[in-house]
């Protein structure tokens, strides 16, 4: 999953994406790397209703670092309940990070189609970082001011404003 998320993020030009495995390593070197990062994406399986210990150890060590405004995201696999991803997202929000893309949870070992979802997830995060995201339905939006009026029955003339998002 992590490699597919990385591949999706790397498909967006202008980014350098690094992948690290926390298992069995010290946390301190990762804290230094995180201070320099613009976005952090954490992957963890759900084991006994929780994220794995190395993820919590790292997230706990980030309390003394200013992460306000950085982009954060989470993904993971699960066998029964899948609580790890929302728990990580809550912690990222608690650290004042922006979480613009909903976390990705997949049951057990991902299929080829689910790995495509992982790549799409990585691309969405990268697009949020670069400001190139164009969520579905935002290409054109029309606001009818008559619908916003607290007195729609007055029959006043309607004004409309159209906005267009450029890709």
Image: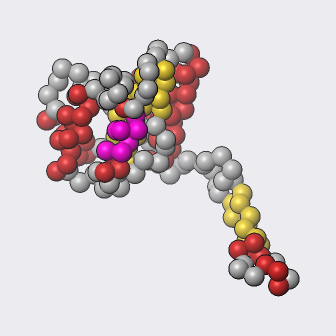
Residue 117 lies in the magenta-colored region: no
Q: Residue at x 40, y 51 (%)?
A: 98
In the image: residue 57, left or right of residue 129: left
Q: Position of residue 3 (x, y in %)?
A: 41, 23
Q: Residue at x 66, y 53 (%)?
A: 138
In this orientation, which residue lies closer to the viewer: 37 or 60? 60
In the image: residue 98, left or right of residue 144: left
In this orientation, which residue lies closer to the viewer: 101 or 16? 101
Q: Position of residue 44 (x, y in %)?
A: 35, 27
In this orientation, which residue lies closer to the viewer: 145 or 67? 145
Q: On screen, 75 above or below 101?
A: above
Q: On screen, 36 above or below 7?
A: below
Q: Position of residue 87 (x, y in %)?
A: 35, 38
Judged by its main secondary structure, the magenta piece is helix
Q: Residue at x 21, y 45 (%)?
A: 62
Residue 86 lies in the magenta-colored region: yes
Q: How many discs appear?
A: 0
> Where's the N terminus, which quadrant?
top left
Q: Which residues are magenta?
A: 85-91
Residue 157 in view (yes/no): no
In the image: residue 18, left or right of residue 81: left
Q: On screen, 157 above or below 8?
A: below
Q: Position of residue 160 (x, y in %)?
A: 77, 72
The colour scheme applied to this rendered structure is: secondary structure
Residue 26 in view (yes/no): yes
Q: On screen, 63 above or below 50?
A: below
In this orientation, which residue lies closer to the viewer: 131 or 161? 161
């Amino acid at each position: 999953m992590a490699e597919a998320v990385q591949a999706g993020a790397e498909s967006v030009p202008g980014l350098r994406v690094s992948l690290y495995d926390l298992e069995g390593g010290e946390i301190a070197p990762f804290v230094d790397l995180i201070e320099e990062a613009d976005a952090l994406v954490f992957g963890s399986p759900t084991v006994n209703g929780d994220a794995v210990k190395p993820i919590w150890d790292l997230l706990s060590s980030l309390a003394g670092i200013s992460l306000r405004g950085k982009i954060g995201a989470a993904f993971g696999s699960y066998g029964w309940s899948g609580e790890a991803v929302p728990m990580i997202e809550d912690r990222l929000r608690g650290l004042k990070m922006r979480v613009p893309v909903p976390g990705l949870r997949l049951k057990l070992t991902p299929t080829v189609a689910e790995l495509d979802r992982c790549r799409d997830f990585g691309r969405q995060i990268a697009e949020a970082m670069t400001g190139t995201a164009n969520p579905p339905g935002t290409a054109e939006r029309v606001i009818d001011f008559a619908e916003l009026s607290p007195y729609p029955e007055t029959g006043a003339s309607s004004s409309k404003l159209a906005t267009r998002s450029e890709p």
